[in-house]
C-alpha cells in the first residue's frame, strides 16, 4: 500500500508545527534528505559475516525490496558514479526463524555515512511506557487497551535522489541501490518519529480521542471500562491509516483488552500492575545468576542489565497508580581503572561475594 502523498499534503497544510510540517511536505514530495555532510566518493565494503549460510534469505529479501519499489538492482557493474557501498547483514527478529536485513551505515568508523550525519539531526525524544500508564491511571481500573504497529515503517519514507549514492549494496557480484530509509541509518528514527507524531495528531483531530500515545511505529490506545470507546478508536485509526495509505500489521494488533504488552512491558489494568513478560524475566534472572558466579563483571554488562529493567525502579512502590513489579537495581557500582565493576567502596577483590542480589529483590513476583 503506497503512501497517498496528496492526502498527507492536505493534512500538512493544517499542521501547527511548521518546521516539522515542511520537513514532511518536502520529504513526501521530493524524498527525505539524510543530512550527510561528508565526501561522496566511491567505496566498496565486504558484507557482515552474519549472512554466511543465509545467502538465499538475503537474496529473497533484496528481491522483495526491489519488487516493492524501494530498491534498484541488481546491476552487473557500479550503477552510480561515486556510489558508497556499506556492509549488509541479517539479525534475528523476536519471532523464531525470522530475520531482519540490516545495512551497516556505521562502517567504517570515523568516515561512515552515519558518522558524517550531524548528531543534532539524529536526536529524538520518545514517549515511554509511563505515558501509557498515565493514560490508564486517568481512566481507572479495568481500562480497555489496544495496540497496533505500522508495517515496514522506515521503508515507507523514500530518500531524496541526491542521497541514493550513500546507500549502495553489493551482494554475490551484483550491486543494488537502496532508496528508502533503513534501520541502520542514524537519522531514520528522527524522521520517522516526526511522521508518527504527525499521524497521531491527525488521528486526534479527526476522532477527538485523546487517550493515545505512540513510540515510533507502535501505537497505544485506551478507553474506559465497559465501553466501546477503545474499540471504536482502534477501528477509526485503522480506517484513517487506510485513507492515508499507511499499512498496519494485523498480526501485531491486540485488543481491546485489559492486559497486553507495550514497549516490552506487560500492563494489567485489572490489578493495575506492570510486569516483565515471561521471556524477559527469564533472561534477566539468568543474567543475574551468571554474574553472581563471576569474580569480576565489566561495567558495560551491569549497565546493560540495569537498562533492560529501568522501567521498574522503585521496587514495589506505587508508580502512577500502578504497582511496579520489578526493582532492577541490585548493585551499587563504580568503575575502576581496569574497566571492571566494583562495589560502592571501591573494592575489586573477590567480587563473587559482593556481586549479589539485594535483600528481597523481586522479579515479577519471583524471589531469588
Image (tube, rainbow, N blue to C red):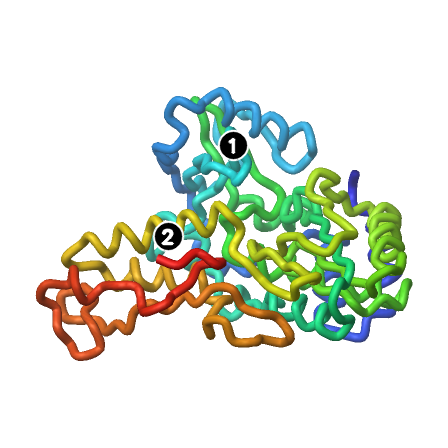
Closer to us: mark 1 or mark 2?
2
Tell me, yes or no, if residue 338 can be seen here: yes
Residue extending farthest left: 349
Q: Secondary structure at mark 2?
A: helix
Q: Secondary structure at mark 1?
A: loop
Residue under pointer 2: 285
- CA–CA distance in space, label 1 to label 2: 21 Å
- Answer with left or right where residue 10 lies relative to residue 133: right
Report the front residue among 312 and 49. 312
Sooner in the amino-acid sequence: mark 1 or mark 2: 1
Q: Position of residue 262 (x, y in %)?
A: 63, 56
Question: Where is residue 248 shown, x and y percent of the image?
Answer: 75, 44
Q: Are marks 1 and 2 in contact (CB under 8 Å)?
A: no
Q: Residue at x 57, y 29 (%)?
A: 61
Q: On screen, 296 above or below 251?
A: below
- Residue 177 in which image quadrant: top right
> Residue at (62%, 44%) from the top-left corner?
180
Residue 101, given in percent of the width and then of the height, sits at 51, 36
Question: What residue is drawn where x is 43% and y is 44%?
Answer: 104
Placement of the C terminus among the 4 image quadrants = bottom left
Name above or below for residue 2 compared with residue 143.
above
Q: Nearer the viewer, residue 361 or 300?
A: 361
On residue 60, which mark appears?
none
Task: Report the side of 296 relative to 303 (left or right).
Answer: left
Residue 6 visible somewhere in the drawing: no
- Tell me the tag on residue 96: 1
Q: Residues within 10 Å of mark 1 (few under 14, many from 20)?
A: few
Amino acid at each position: 500500500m503506497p503512501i497517498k502523498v496528496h492526502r498527507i499534503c492536505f493534512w500538512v497544510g493544517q499542521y501547527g508545527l511548521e518546521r516539522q510540517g515542511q520537513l514532511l511536505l518536502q520529504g513526501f514530495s521530493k524524498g527525505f534528505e539524510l543530512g550527510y555532510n561528508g565526501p561522496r566518493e566511491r567505496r566498496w565494503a565486504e558484507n557482515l559475516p552474519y549472512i554466511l549460510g543465509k545467502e538465499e534469505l538475503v537474496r529473497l529479501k533484496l528481491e522483495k525490496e526491489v519488487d516493492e519499489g524501494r530498491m534498484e538492482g541488481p546491476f552487473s557493474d557500479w550503477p552510480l558514479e561515486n556510489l558508497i557501498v556499506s556492509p549488509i547483514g541479517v539479525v534475528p527478529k523476536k519471532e523464531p526463524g525470522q530475520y531482519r536485513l540490516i545495512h551497516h551505515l556505521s562502517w567504517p568508523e570515523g568516515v561512515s555515512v552515519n558518522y558524517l550525519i550531524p548528531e543534532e539531526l539524529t536526536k529524538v525524544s520518545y514517549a515511554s511506557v509511563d505515558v501509557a500508564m498515565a493514560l490508564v491511571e486517568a481512566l481507572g481500573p479495568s481500562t480497555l487497551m489496544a495496540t497496533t504497529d505500522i508495517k515496514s515503517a522506515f521503508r515507507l519514507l523514500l530518500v531524496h535522489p541526491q542521497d541514493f549514492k550513500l546507500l549502495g549494496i553489493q551482494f554475490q557480484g551484483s550491486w543494488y541501490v537502496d532508496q528508502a530509509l533503513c534501520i541502520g541509518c542514524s537519522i531514520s528514527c528522527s524522521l520517522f518519529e516526526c511522521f508518527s507524531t504527525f499521524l497521531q495528531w491527525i488521528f486526534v483531530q479527526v476522532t477527538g480521542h485523546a487517550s493515545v500515545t505512540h513510540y515510533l511505529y507502535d501505537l497505544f490506545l485506551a478507553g474506559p471500562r465497559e465501553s466501546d470507546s477503545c474499540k471504536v478508536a482502534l477501528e477509526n485509526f485503522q480506517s484513517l491509516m487506510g485513507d492515508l495509505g499507511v499499512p498496519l500489521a494485523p498480526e501485531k494488533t491486540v485488543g481491546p483488552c485489559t492486559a497486553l504488552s507495550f514497549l516490552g512491558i506487560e500492563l494489567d489494568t485489572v490489578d493495575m500492575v506492570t510486569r516483565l513478560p515471561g521471556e524477559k524475566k527469564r533472561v534477566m534472572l539468568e543474567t543475574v545468576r551468571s554474574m553472581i558466579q563471576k569474580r569480576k563483571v565489566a561495567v558495560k554488562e551491569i549497565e546493560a542489565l540495569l537498562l533492560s529493567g529501568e522501567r521498574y525502579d522503585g521496587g514495589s512502590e506505587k508508580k502512577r497508580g500502578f504497582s511496579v513489579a520489578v526493582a532492577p537495581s541490585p548493585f551499587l557500582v563504580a568503575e575502576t581503572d581496569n574497566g571492571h565493576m566494583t562495589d560502592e567502596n571501591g573494592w575489586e577483590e573477590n567480587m563473587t561475594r559482593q556481586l549479589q542480589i539485594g535483600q528481597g529483590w523481586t522479579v515479577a513476583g519471583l524471589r531469588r
